[in-house]
Image (cartoon, coloured by chain):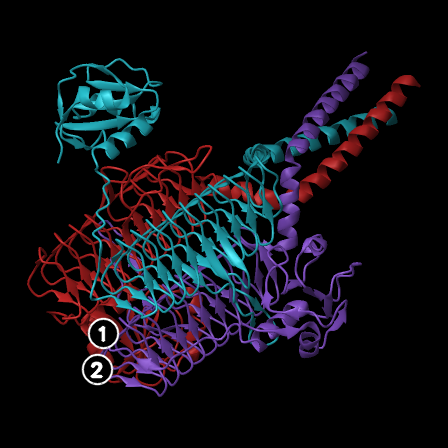
Chain colours: A cyan, B purple, C red
């Protein structure tokens, strides 16, 4: 695949070599799996013990990790970032878009396709849809009526984009994602719950990434919005009329109920939830498995269910573990007090 | 799209206008997004501050929300319900079923298709399947051997209906849902877990709605059942042999383990779970993120994990926050008691 | 379908009949649903009350459940296992693989297909892919470039196997599963989060089963691994670089964050989570809804969030319910102590 020296790599990323700069690198592998010829990465203290065991020919190492070694290493201030740069320069992540429209796709008549698009087999594009330049729609994906997709967007196989949703440019949508399913609007009653018509849409802005099997519901009316640069992990649920701000990170299996709004740069850890109709400020961080039930000002770090300040949450949970001890203490105190009462009683009556 | 006056709309829904009844309405939008010509909706106190800011030409408002305004408003007892009625009358939610069977579908020989069905491209219908009148099966959906689907049912793209499952009439199934996957029946042992054959089926009764990327497993033997009128949100998991009663609402990312049974009208909030083999009574409400671990009588409102009465849960959690204070108090008490002991000791020995 | 006597069945599984051994069995059904001619199963004490009500002609019953009855029963030490054996002997779970390659599939030129494969309509197989003997790939499934699939593997409809992933032999993958989506590697910053290239792969070893709508991300570099015999339930998320040991059971809606490693025989109950970069030992059992945040030695049973020893968790939670009582006790103690102080004070001053 490739063939470069340790000193070549060090130059690309402005790194400092110790050991043999002339070693030849032909592959990339983790510390555990690496063999002769591989470059590996060490960016976390946790994995330092693997440094002496690895068979890698060279290791890219974070300058903060100081450890005596005879191995050939390249030191940089941010090893993880430098590693990504090497991957890019070696074109290991090259995404081979082969432009062309498969004869096995089903494309309606009034469809507007940009230049250099890639439409794979068994894609369906319905009437009124628009696909921007150099966008790639992979096998089995459904593009509903009047859907609009920007340019340089990559849609993986078996995605469903329902009618009228709008997808920006430089967006990535992973397999199995569903965008524009009906919002869950039902009113429970004596009989079968009454469905509220869901006639709004979904807008996915530029540079958004949407994980595998994510679901994003269309608005009851108006629009559900995922703003510029937000990244969504797998199996996340976003309900109708939600508005997710710019550059948020929503981790796997988290969920946001109807009409909630998130500011910019919110981070939602795995399996967390946000209740309906509440407002989360900018750069709020929500711990894993939390459930947010009320408006939260910007910059807060919250945890638990109902979510509260994460330090308060930690203290409360730490004290929970001390509860059995507490019960013991109280029983002892009761005994002491009762004995004191008796002593005083005896003293006063004698 | 449409063009009606405020007074026309008010008549449809028996509402009272204040302001200009002759204003012309040509669109629908939220308070925030509305511009001239739009009708908007205000049904929650929370959004009252938006009333003065909105650019909407008229606002449909809940009679319970009293607020002085110069805006043109239409007052009704239940604004949300009236709004849905307007959407319906304007046919904004019209679902354009165009009957016809795509030549790009793959339909086996021994298949029974009703009149007026719509079968889109890349649908597969296997031997022995039956599709009722006016049912629509959208692109890329798989209908397995001997599957039976009722009439007026709408199945969105990329759904998988595995062999023998039965889907009722007037059912809606959203994209990516999987119905009839094997139940998770494994016995752990010394070696590879042994799989129990899963030879039962799934029955989805009439008027059920199933969200995007929901999974409903077939029974080990016999059947998994979703009864009439139940509505299921996105990414919900229903295990083998579960029996969900009529008119339940199961919210996003909730899950039900094997052989649990739910009564009528149960509401399960987001990310909640129900353990295997337990029985939930009628009209039980389960709070978000709860985990129900034992049989629950009808009408209860439960929360927490393990789930308990929700008021008890609230009290317990409120006291958790007071724990650090409690520790302080106990330490103070200990000091006092020790000092009392000393005093008594001194008193008795002097 | 079939037609056997109770005594025939008893012989197959080495069971003891009481009642009429000549009764004819023609079907299988649960205690509740069974009618004349059906064999049913009773393996849990919980369902003993159904024994007298059932219309089943015969009941296979666990030897541990002793209960007087006039019904025709077959007693065996492990009724559940014996029942599975009967299903197998009756071939009720027969999976009808009909070899053949559909003309409606899209198969690239440089693809290697084994003997006896079954490739259904609208399957896409990209350049460089390899499919082993007697493997079945059902409708609408996508097999990406250079994907390798072993023999006797069954892939249900609408699965997505992205480029280069490796699937073993005797594997089952249910509908909607996505294997090889990009890992969620983003670095938050001032602007749009920076994406780390995800250039590794996924390896699914032999005898693994993967549930409906599961997502397994490819490694950042190197590989995400699911080892031999592990069984994964629906809607589970497995992040990049995770290593799941042999014969684990991962229940529905559980999730594992990046680079975590699991030993052999780990059981993860529903909706549980494991944090990134941690190490779980062999045969650890993780309770439902738990969140594991640190390395866990082998054989432990853990619960809660953060997860701890499950007995400790139970005690802590039990004490939580006693908190209101505790507050009462402390207030009483305070009163008593204050009153004692007064008494002593009065005594010493009089």
Rendering coords of residue A137 (x, y %): 29, 57
Residue on which disc 2 sits: C2
**Residues at badges 2 and 1 in contact (C-beta under 8 Å)?**
yes
Q: Is residue B25 rendered to the left or right of residue A192?
A: right
Q: Residue visible at 66% across and 61% down?
A: B56
Q: Which quarter of the image is occupied by the C terminus of chain C?
A: top right
For the image, the number of numbered tags is 2
Mark earlier in primary sequence (2, 1): 2
Q: Is residue B194 rendered to the left or right of residue C268?
A: left
Considering depth in this image, is C105 or C1 the residue closer to the camera?
C105
Same chain? Circles 2 and 1 = yes
Q: Distance between the residues labelled 2 and 1?
A: 9 Å
Q: Is residue A120 rendered to the left or right of residue A190?
A: left
Residue A220, quarter of picture: bottom right
Q: Is mark 2 on a helix, strand or loop?
A: loop
Residue lying farthest to the bottom in this orientation = B115
| Figure check: C297 above or below B52 | above
Residue B176, quarter of picture: bottom left
Rendering coords of residue B251 (x, y %): 50, 61
| Figure check: C308 above or below C42 | above
**Nearer to us: label 2 or label 1:** 1
Rendering coords of residue A210 (x, y %): 39, 50
Residue on which disc 1 sits: C92
Considering depth in this image, is C209 or A280 the residue closer to the camera?
A280
Which chain is mark 1 on?
A: C
């Amino acid at each position: 695949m490739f063939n470069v020296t340790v000193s070549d790599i060090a130059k690309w990323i402005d790194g400092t070599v110790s050991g043999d700069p002339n070693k030849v690198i032909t592959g990339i592998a983790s510390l555990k799996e690496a063999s002769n010829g591989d470059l590996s990465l060490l960016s976390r203290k946790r994995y330092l013990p693997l440094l002496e065991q690895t068979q890698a020919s060279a290791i890219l190492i974070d300058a903060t990790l100081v450890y005596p070694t005879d191995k050939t290493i390249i030191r940089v201030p941010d090893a993880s970032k430098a590693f990504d740069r090497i991957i890019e320069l070696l074109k290991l992540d090259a995404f081979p878009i082969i432009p062309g429209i498969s004869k096995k796709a089903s494309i309606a008549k009034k469809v507007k396709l940009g230049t250099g698009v890639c439409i794979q087999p068994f894609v369906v594009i319905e009437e009124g849809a628009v696909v921007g330049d150099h966008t790639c729609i992979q096998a089995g994906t459904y593009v509903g009526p009047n859907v609009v997709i920007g340019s340089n967007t990559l849609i993986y196989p078996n995605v469903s984009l329902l009618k009228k949703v709008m997808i920006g440019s430089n967006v990535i949508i992973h397999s199995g994602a569903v965008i524009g399913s009906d919002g869950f609007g039902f009113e429970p009653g004596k009989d079968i719950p009454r469905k509220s018509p869901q006639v709004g849409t979904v807008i996915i802005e530029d540079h958004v990434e949407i994980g595998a099997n994510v679901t994003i519901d269309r608005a009851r009316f108006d629009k559900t919005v995922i703003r510029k640069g937000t990244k969504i992990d797998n199996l996340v649920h976003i309900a109708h009329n939600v508005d997710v701000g710019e550059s948020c990170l929503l981790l796997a299996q988290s969920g946001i109920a109807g009409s909630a709004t998130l500011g910019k740069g919110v981070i939602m850890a795995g399996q967390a939830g946000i209740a309906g109709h509440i407002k989360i400020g900018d750069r709020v961080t929500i711990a894993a498995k939390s459930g947010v039930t009320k408006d939260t000002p910007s910059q807060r770090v919250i945890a638990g269910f109902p979510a509260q300040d994460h330090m308060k949450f930690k203290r409360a949970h730490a004290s929970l573990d001390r509860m059995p001890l507490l019960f013991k203490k109280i029983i002892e105190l009761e005994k002491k007090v009762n004995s004191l009462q008796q002593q005083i009683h005896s003293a006063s009556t004698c």
